[in-house]
Image (cartoon, helix red, strand yellow):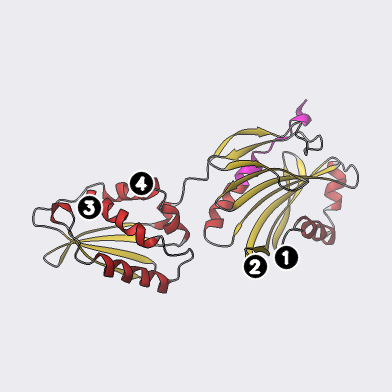
Amino acid sequence: MRTLLLFLLVFYAVKGSYGQSLSERDISILAEDIEAEKQGIIFFDGIEFKGCISKKRTLIYQYNISEDGALDENAVDNATQYIKDIGEGDFFYRNNIDLEFQYYKKDSLLHKFAVNSEDLAPQKYELGEYLSIKGHPKSKQVNLKIKSPVAWRVKEGDLPNIVKQFVMDGNTYAISIRDNITFFSRRQTMELFEDSGDVEFMILDSYAGLENVEIIDYSITTIDSYPAIISKVKGTMKFIGRDLTMITISWLVFYEDKIVILSGTGAIGRIFNKLESLYWRITNSVVFPDQYK
């Protein structure tokens, strides 16, 4: 639908001045701003911008079309793909804003369609090829393979124990390796995990970069047959002079005389549900090849 796509281009210039995490009131103000600026604009084929309103978390665009105006039969798919192609789907997804487009003839509603914000999630959640840390200066002789997410930047760790980081839009998955106090067999590690006090101490110790840490949940699991603690915590960190609430999910893998820490971090919000699923898949891709020799 050419008219729809043209109007979306006009709309984004207005949208760009708004921040993330918009409230329903913010969305209402955004609709008012769009309507005030675009009222009466006539596009090609005689299609006129009628108005923009909001209903809870839905932005509703309204158009008047001419008597012989035609609508695209694939409007939903075309609009969804277009918004994603130009990189704007993330705004609507993050803010949980659905879109509806209404077309009128002589003030009678002729046709409408909707684009759900869930369908506008950015395509940043697929895994790519394996990456090996074997021989890395910070690997401490740990041989580990892990899949990195497609389109995420792979960078070197910026602290002594961080080997690699996968980074995208302020979200980070990190691979860290620490020396343990001694060698632990798998059986010895599982016995250690029987003491909940020890487990909680190890969890809190692994989140030294966060303040006001609150353990949301934890459990015992294995990563490629090695015992591990999986935990999810909430905490705060300083960002441009203010406290930012973050959520982190991490796996503490007891690998012989080392602790491998796999951790995924992001801001609390709707987007973290997608990130958590991705972090699980990254971690489940981990292979310790030396045990198979």
Q: Is residue 234 above or below residue 5?
A: below
Residue 287 sits inside the magenta stretch: yes
Q: Residues within 10 Å of mark 1 (few under 14, many from 20)?
A: some
Is 114 situated left or right of 249 in this image?
A: left
Screen quadrant of the C terminus: top right
Most prominent secondary structure in the magenta stretch? helix
- Evaluate whether residue 56 shows in this view: no
Q: Secondary structure at mark 1?
A: strand
Residue 121 sits inside the magenta stretch: no
* Residue depth check, mark 2 versus mark 4: number of the one nearer the observer: 2
Q: Are marks 4 and 3 in contact (CB under 8 Å)?
A: no
Type of amino acid at the residue the image marks with label 2: Asp
Residue sitting at x 36%, y 50%: 83
- Where is residue 72 drawn, in percent x and y? 21, 48
Q: Earlier in the sequence, mark 1 or mark 4?
A: 4
Type of amino acid at the residue the image marks with label 4: Gln
Residue 3: which disc?
3
> From this viewpoint, which residue is outermost toward the right?
182
- Evaluate whether residue 97 shows in this view: yes
Q: Which residue is nearer to you in this view: 86 or 95?
A: 86
Q: Earlier in the sequence, mark 2 or mark 4?
A: 4
Q: Which residue is nearer to you in this view: 167 or 292?
A: 167
Q: Residues within 10 Å of mark 4 (few under 14, many from 20)?
A: some
Q: Are marks 2 and 4 in contact (CB under 8 Å)?
A: no
Q: Earlier in the sequence, mark 4 or mark 3?
A: 3
Residue 243: which disc?
2
User: Which residue is tagged 1?
Assistant: 211
Separation of marks 2 and 1 at Cα, in angstroms: 9 Å
Residue 49: which disc?
none
Q: Secondary structure at mark 4?
A: helix
User: Which residue is tagged 4?
Assistant: 81
